[in-house]
Amino acid sequence: MEAGIVGYPGSGRSTVFNALLAHRAQEAAGARKSGAAIGVIHVQDARLEELSARFKPKKTTPIEIRLHDLCPSLEPNFPTAEIEAMKRMDLLLLVIPAFADPDPAAQLAGLDGLVADLCLEDLAAIEKLIKRTTREKTDATVKEALDLIQTALEASIPVISASSLQAQHREALRGYGLITDRPMIAVANNAEDAAGTPPPAELVKRGEELGIPILALAAGLEAEMAELAAEDRVEFLAEYGVSEPAGAAVTRAILERGDIIPFFTAGEDECRAWAIARNTAAKQAAGKIHSDIERGFIRAEVIGYDEYEPLAGGLTEAKSKGLLRVEGKDYIVQDGDIVNFRHNT
């Protein structure tokens, strides 16, 4: 999953990037592509850790979130490179500089301003598309969708949150790559002396209206603990009234807002968590592992983690007790399913 951090100069965007990576495995942190630093968050999951403890595999592979510190925004317009980078993201993380002004009204203005600017970028693209439809033959559903999106964007409503759009409108515009047609989360970047302070109620309410969950973190403080041993980090943050590292909360929020769930494969060679969209069918989930498995899909052998966990004999006991289900290609894979795919080679 690709998540991009977006914020204006002075918002602490890069500090947030460093804070989120401070307590997660880092790979390629600092690598640059189109002006963005890239780091990797390994999503911690107690279920995967338990599977690894039982199977003792050669390799354990968690879900990865590739975090992009997108190149600095330049008012009044975003650079072209940043616009294109945002369009490649699965989710955007918006940074509000609460440390600069803790007043809720200022934070509210910061969120509204950033969202409005993103909407303006999409509006410019939509207006070009509308002009094109006046010259070319265009499907009626597409025309209607463009008009509805234009109205929403003019009111600074992100496309993903536009209640006027029906399923057929969203399907008609699939692939247009609009920036605000992807999940978003916002973080209020607090000052160190406000660590542990939740986001203002006014900001949370506005986020609900926009379909943007709001979190709070003190990025500067959390970035400081990058050099601490893992066991010292929780104690360090507790002194400032922070119950858990921001990376854990933000990681959960990214997966929840992106409607992403894990399923597991387990064996002596590897125990692995695979990220899929909720409501993914078994055959498509198999394709996450390899396209050949999807093409040659025969069946899926499945047990939910909660069914598996109390079994001392693991999968062998599950088979003997008839708990390992055989599912077809249309089975909807559930959060925490342990799956073995049978397929033609």
Image: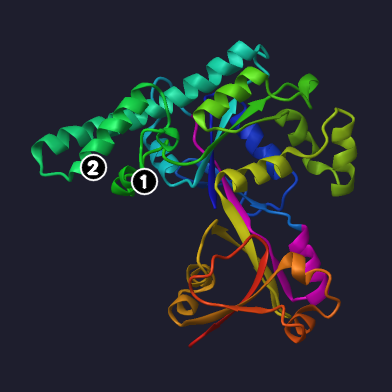
**Residue at position x 48%, y 40% from top?**
35
Q: Which residues are magenta?
A: 46-72
| Upstream in sequence: badge 2 or badge 1 | 2
Q: Magenta includes 98? A: no
Q: In front: mark 2 or mark 1?
A: 1
Residue 47, position in %: x, y? 76, 62
Viewer-nearest residue: 217 or 254: 254
Q: CA distance from mark 2 to mark 1?
A: 12 Å
- In the image, is residue 50 part of the stretch drawn in magenta? yes
For residue 67, above or below residue 296: above
Q: Which quarter of the picture shows residue 299? A: bottom right
| Relative horizontal placement of residue 164, taking residue 228 as reference (left or right) | left
Foreground pick, 147 / 268: 147
Residue 119 screen position, x and y as percent: 39, 28
Counting every numbered tag in the picture gives 2
- The local crowd at label 1, few if under 14, some if 14 to 19, many if 20 or more residues have their Cα within 10 Å, is few
Query: Which is nearer the eye, 307 or 156?
Result: 307
Residue type marked 2:
Val
Residue 38 in sight here:
yes
Residue 148 drawn above or below residue 300: above
Q: Is residue 10 visible?
A: no
Residue at 41 percent of width and 40 percent of height: 181
Q: Is residue 241 left or right of residue 123?
A: right
Q: x, y percentage for residue 141? A: 23, 43
Q: In the picture shown, does residue 164 fall above or below 197?
A: below
The answer to which image quadrant residue 118 occupies is top left
- Residue 167's tag is 1
Q: Secondary structure at mark 1?
A: helix
Return the x and y of residue 307 as percentages of the image width and height: 76, 69
Position of 19 with respect to 256 (left or right) is right
* Residue pointed to by mark 2: 142
Give the label on residue 67, or none. Answer: none
